[in-house]
Image: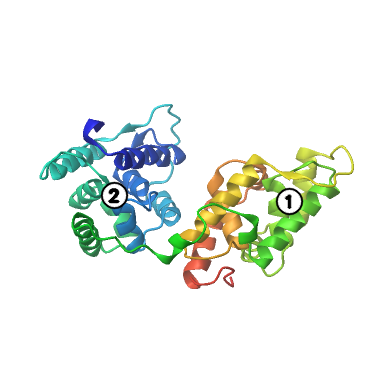
Amino acid sequence: MLEHFSAGAIAAIRQAQEEARRAEFSRMNAAHVVMGLASDPAGLAGQALAGAGFDVRRARLAAGRIWGRGYERAQQIIPADEAREVFERAVAIAGQTSPLLVDTQDLLRAILAQTEGRGHELLRAMAIDTAALLNRLMAAREAELAGNAVPQASVQALPRHYHPRLLAPLARQAMERAEAETRAAGHHIIGTEQLLLGLLETAGGTAAAVLSRHGLGVDDVRGIVHRVIGPGSGTVRNPVQSRYMGEACARAWQAALARHHEQVGTGHLLLGMLDLDAGGALHMLDMLKAPLSALQYDLEQAFEADPRAVEPVW
């Protein structure tokens, strides 16, 4: 079925499969496709969704509240009936012009036409005006057909990839505390568990406020870290970051970019770790029975309450 789909459309569908796998569903539905489309800011669908205020992380929270988790482990994620209907409708929409090539805007138009599908339900749950979204999408499409450049958000001028210089002062302090925790324990690698400690130790940070609100303290986390990991091999001068730390920082920068922030704050770092679904920090939080969804929700609420602030006051 995908032989007439563009590379961008196929990439969005692949990302939709990952969204389904992330929520432990064996079937990909139209809501997953919406999130897949939003993950590509270069596509017309992604631009229209971003302009309408759609955010993938908020969408995951909304989807979790509506449908929960699937608790299904499958090696292959297959389309549900409504997703197949979206693909077929997108082919019909794209077939109105020649040559036949289904792109991301065709997929989003198909989802918007499927008013009883989960894609539409997710957009409504996020208070997205679907009529305005369609108008925005069609305007972007007309601009592209006319050969005009689609206006890009100012965030596009910022670096695409994470670099330590992007850390805001409190986030830099948290990183320094994470390194100090690593050296004090005699370890050679700074992991997300040390970053979790660093965030808790950084007074005035959004992450510390949210974590403390849910009963998480430095001593409790440090005790779990020492019990699970144990002491290191001795004096360490220059510990290096783990792969999970690097990935968490990269995701933190993406969280900052999504909010048009020019720096990474402690809240972004915590969002990056929660978004990772792996690493020592999540293992420690799980052992402490921390409510991961509630932590992410509170972070999102803090940023929504003060959207311009890199370090919103909770």
**176 to the left or right of 304:** right
First along the sequence among labels 2 and 1: 2
Under mark 1, the amino acid is Val
**Residue 73 makes an appearance in the image:** yes
Query: Where residue 175 sits: x, y (%)?
Result: 71, 56
Identify the residue under disc 2. Answer: 119
Which image quarter: residue 217? bottom right
Name the residue beneath numbered marker 1: 221
Residue appearing at x 23%, y 65% in the figure:
132
* Residue 53 place in picture, x, y as percent: 36, 63
The kind of secondary structure element at disc 1 is helix
Q: Residues within 10 Å of mark 2 (few under 14, many from 20)?
A: many
Judge whether 211 appears above or below 276 on screen. below
Direction from residue 207 to residue 94 in the image, left or right: left
36 vs 150: above or below: above
Residue 282: tell me if it is visible. Answer: no
Most foreground residue, 274 or 166? 166
Q: Position of residue 91 (x, y in %)?
A: 17, 39
Q: Between residues 7 and 189, which one lies in front from this camera angle?
A: 7
In the picture, measured across the screen, residue 234 lies left or right of residue 140, that is: right
Q: Nearer the viewer, mark 2 or mark 1?
A: 2
Residue furthest to the front in view is 147
Give the residue type at disc 2. Gly
Residue 128, picture quadrant: bottom left
